[in-house]
Image (cartoon, rainbow, N blue to C red):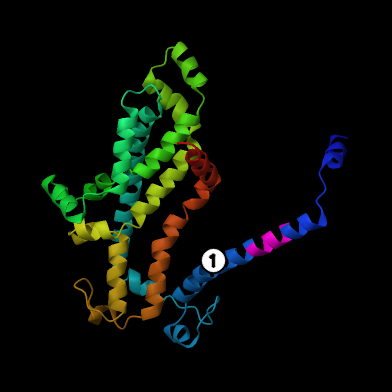
Amino acid sequence: MKLKKAHKNKIKSSPADRAVQIAIYVIVGLVGLITLLPFLYIIAGSFATEKELTEKAFFIIPTEVSLNAYNYITRTGEIFRGLKNSIFLTVVGTITNMFFTTTFAYPLSQKDFKGRNVVLNLVIVTMLFSGGMIPTFLVVKNLGLYNSFWSLILLGAVSPFNMIIIKNFFQEIPAELKEAARIDGSNDLGIFVKIILPLSKPVLASISLFYAVGHWNDYFSAMIYLQDPKKETVQIVLRRIVLLAGGIQTDMFDFDILGTPPDKAVKMAATVVATIPILAVYPFVQKFFTKGVMVGAVKG
């Protein structure tokens, strides 16, 4: 009975509305397909032969499956060490980012916090101006962080933009919950850990993904601050492999040992190796993604 009643109360769409909805679905589908096709081509190309990549402009399924590109990338074992370093940096770096960002955002979300506006203005200044590459390098070196993973982890421990999003999300949590917790005897730390953080899962998951992607794709900082080959990230290792496949000799690999490199297939395989691991994380936080960012960005 309830279903029949709900069906009767449902607002019927007019023909014009249905036409608009169909047009929206078609446009979204086309945009999605256009976005997806390059990824499919890169994945297919990484498994294709060099001859097929040269002769065909575009294909989704390779005529002959070849693992030469992946064999070439993994032959020296450097890629696995790069992946290990990148995973370490991504996990430890993201945890560090979230610790400093949430503990910075919570006091600023409290309207009775003295000097709140002054601190917020100083944070905004850092979004507009930076110290520059050379001063930053000198600071890192004088602190003894050069050629250390901590140079990449601590250098961007707090992103002002992400901190403001989290602060705005914290402000939306009803003050009555905090007051009830204080009446029950909780202090600020207890309220933060037991109430604020559990209620902020959407924004925490979204910002964690931002930080994780940033650490995973961090190529420039790793190139500047890490000189030990054993500490190089996967992005640096892949760069060397791609340069070698393009005919540019590097000091890491030997043409005689690795043989003739499959140029295009190696570049595509390198793209797949650099993209798939971080892409695999997204489905686990997708349900929090839109809600977390939108709610945190609505009010300042």
Q: Nearer the viewer, residue 90 or 31?
A: 31
Determine if residue 158 is in view.
no
Q: What residue is rendered at 32% in x and 67% in y?
A: 238
Residue of label 1 = 35
Question: Residue 294, image x and y in percent?
Answer: 52, 43
Q: Is residue 129 left or right of residue 173?
A: left
Q: Residue at x 34, y 50 (%)?
A: 90
Locate the C terminus and report the quarter of the image it occupies.
top left
Residue sitting at x 59%, y 67%: 33
State the image quarter where residue 193 is shown.
top left
Q: Nearer the viewer, residue 177 or 123?
A: 123
Region rendered in magenta? 21-27
In this rendering, the answer to whether 293 lies above or below 49 is: above
User: Whole-percent x and y of residue 5?
Assistant: 86, 37
* Residue 297 coordinates in the image, percent (x, y): 48, 41
Q: Residue at x 70, y 62 (%)?
A: 23
Left or right of 32 in this view: 113: left
Q: Residues within 10 Å of mark 1 (few under 14, many from 20)?
A: few
* Whether residue 270 is situated above or below residue 20 in the rendered picture: below
